[in-house]
Image (tube, rainbow, N blue to C red):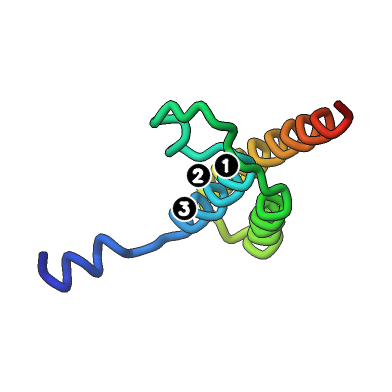
Amino acid sequence: MSNAQSTQSMKIDFTTFILSISSAAFMGLGMSRETETQGDLTSPSIDLELAKQNIDLLELMTEKTRGNLSTDEERLLQQLLFETRMHFVEATKKMRGGEKR
């Protein structure tokens, strides 16, 4: 692989950037693809602080890029925010439910 090909394959655009942030949020919520694909029977670790920090980053990107995104980028960002927030609420309820036992 030449340097030009290597540089081109490593190019990060806005979509890749927000997908990376949302992936980190999902990992914090214990939703790693690695766990799902390996059929790991152990409970994935949940780090609500990590998840919240990355959800906050998505919110910050929404505020700072308002009016400057393509329709597809805006739609993706809104969808990722919705999904990460909903899973955060579910994980928070699950963690609180486990503490009461």
Can residue 25 be seen at all in this image of the molecule?
Answer: yes
Can residue 66 be seen at all in this image of the molecule?
Answer: no
Res 5 label: none
Res 75 label: 1
Which of 34/80 is in front? Answer: 34
Q: How many numbered circles does the render carry?
A: 3
Are the residues tagged 3 and 2 within 8 Å (C-beta)?
A: yes
Kind of residue at disc 1: Arg
| First along the sequence among labels 1 and 3 | 3
The image quadrant where one finds the C terminus is top right
- For mark 2, what is the residue? 72
Q: Residue at x 43, y 38 (%)?
A: 34
Q: Is residue 45 above or below residue 24?
A: above
Which of 85/29 is in front? Answer: 29
Q: Position of residue 58 (x, y in %)?
A: 64, 54
Q: Position of residue 37 (x, y in %)?
A: 40, 30
| Left or right of residue 87, residue 4 in this image | left
Kind of residue at disc 2: Asp
Comparing labels 1 and 3, the label whose residue is closer to the camera: 3
Are the residues tagged 1 and 2 within 8 Å (C-beta)?
A: yes
Q: CA distance from mark 1 to mark 3?
A: 11 Å
Task: Name the element at disc 2.
Answer: helix
Q: CA distance from mark 3 to mark 2?
A: 9 Å
Q: Residue at x 56, y 48 (%)?
A: 22
Task: Name the element at disc 3.
Answer: helix
Q: Is residue 72 above or below residue 94?
A: below
Image quarter of residue 13 = bottom left
- For mark 3, what is the residue? 15
Which of 57/88 is in front? Answer: 88
Q: Position of residue 60 (x, y in %)?
A: 69, 61
| First along the sequence among labels 3 and 2 | 3
